[in-house]
Image: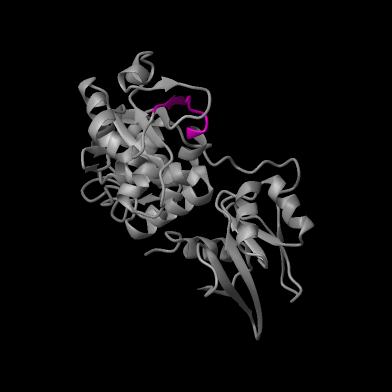
């Protein structure tokens, strides 16, 4: 599996990115911890630096706290992006950090020092600076196995030809797609070059946009959420003509079981039915400000539906499920990484 597709690969890639060229980084899972904790050896000439590194998901203070509670003697925390609050917390405890934006602050007793931080006042590039609904839809089409051509993306997504072409050109510019043959004529079509990096960037952008979505929170009595979705809620949604899909923890349990409990259903519903004031009543629930057991969001793109049907439950596209889990952090992010590792979330995963 390519580097970056597993927690081990992501941690190694983040470390290598902030070190001077020529240094060798070797990771081994620790025998005493699980879930992204590694014994790291950095070889610099004849010298070696050894330390314990652990993955903290999104890098928010809560993510860091979970890691530090689980692993008492961590030396370096690695995450997608270490927040300002997390940096202060780690500085107080004299723990180093590295994130996937290429920033780092490590100062170990062995003399291993790496400091790469964006100066104050100079903002880091937003993860979704080049992402919008069109690019998300085009990426999801690629993850669903649609060839990365303007015609195929246009047909699969319903995007205009111009939007399809712009999205693919942007992916090519970022190095995710390429043209192994001539620029024009026969054999000039784009091919996937770096699917793992495309997934990484898509997941960050999809997660950030998800946080801005409106959410309807519903409550009803249910002892087995997946069974209820299969025999009651799903059939009702289909009878209404709604397009819907399960994402989040429930989807991960169907695609690649990792979690042991499911406290809530996380659903996408097409925009028209999402806005329907009668939707809660139709699925025998009521809208509440808190204490909910169902969350419903508007379907991000038509391609987000392109996951498998499992026992009558329409699951969202695996890449979308991965992005949603990753955005939630904690155990859900671990479930997302498990999904990506054991099943895959790129072409062929659905």
Residue sitting at the far top: 277
Task: Answer left or right for 3 relative to 90.
Answer: left
Task: Answer left or right for 292 relative to 342.
Answer: right
Please tell me whether residue 255 belongs to the stretch shown in magenta.
no
Name the residue: 64% across, 44% down.
124
* Quadrant housing residue 152: top left
Residue 335: image x %, image y %? 43, 52
Residue 1: image x %, image y %? 37, 64
Name the residue: 74% across, 70% down.
108
Task: Answer left or right for 159 relative to 73.
Answer: left
Instruction: Tell me: residue 296, above or below residue 10.
Output: above
Q: Nearer the viewer, residue 103 or 32?
A: 32
Q: Nearer the viewer, residue 189 or 94?
A: 94
Residue 271: image x %, image y %? 36, 21
Residue sitting at the far right: 92
Residue 262: image x %, image y %? 40, 43
Question: Can residue 194 be seen?
Answer: no
Name the residue: 55% across, 69% down.
38
Q: Nearer the viewer, residue 52 or 177?
A: 52
Instruction: Tell me: residue 192, above or below residue 219.
Output: below
Residue sitting at the far bottom: 46
Question: Magenta stretch?
Answer: 210-220
Instruction: Tell me: residue 39, above or below residue 78.
Output: below
Please tell me whether residue 214 belongs to the stretch shown in magenta.
yes
Question: Can residue 100 be seen?
Answer: yes
- What is the number of callouts on the image? 0
């Amino acid at each position: 599996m390519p580097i970056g597709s597993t927690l081990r690969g992501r941690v190694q890639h983040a470390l290598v990115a902030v070190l001077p060229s020529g240094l060798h980084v070797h990771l081994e899972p620790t025998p005493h911890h699980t879930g992204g904790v590694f014994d790291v050896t950095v070889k610099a000439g004849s010298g070696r630096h050894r330390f314990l590194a652990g993955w903290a998901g999104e890098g928010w203070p809560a993510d860091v706290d979970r890691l530090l509670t689980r692993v008492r003697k961590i030396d370096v925390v690695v995450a997608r992006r270490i927040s300002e609050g997390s940096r202060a917390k780690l500085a107080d405890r004299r723990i180093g950090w590295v994130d996937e934006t290429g920033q780092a602050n490590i100062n170990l007793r062995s003399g291993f020092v790496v400091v790469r931080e964006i100066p104050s006042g100079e903002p880091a590039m937003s993860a979704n600076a080049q992402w919008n609904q069109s690019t998300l839809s085009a990426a999801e089409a690629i993850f669903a196995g649609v060839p990365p051509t303007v015609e195929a993306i246009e047909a699969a997504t319903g995007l205009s030809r111009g939007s399809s072409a712009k999205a693919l050109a942007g992916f090519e510019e970022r190095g995710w797609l390429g043209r192994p043959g001539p620029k024009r004529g026969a054999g000039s079509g784009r091919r996937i070059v770096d699917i793992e990096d495309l997934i990484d960037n898509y997941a960050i952008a999809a997660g950030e946009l998800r946080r801005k979505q409106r959410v309807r929170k519903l409550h009803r009595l249910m002892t087995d959420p997946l069974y209820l979705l299969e025999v009651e809620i799903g059939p009702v949604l289909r009878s209404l003509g709604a397009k819907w899909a399960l994402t989040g923890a429930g989807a991960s349990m169907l695609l690649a079981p990792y979690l042991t409990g499911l406290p809530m259903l996380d659903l996408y519903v097409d925009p028209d039915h999402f806005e329907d004031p009668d939707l809660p009543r139709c699925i025998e629930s009521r809208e509440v400000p808190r204490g909910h057991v169902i969350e419903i969001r508007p379907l991000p793109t038509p391609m987000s539906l392109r996951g498998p049907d499992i026992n009558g439950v329409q699951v969202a596209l695996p890449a979308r499920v991965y992005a949603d889990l990753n955005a939630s952090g904690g155990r859900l992010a671990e479930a997302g990484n498990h999904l990506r590792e054991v099943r895959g979330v790129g072409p062929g995963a659905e």
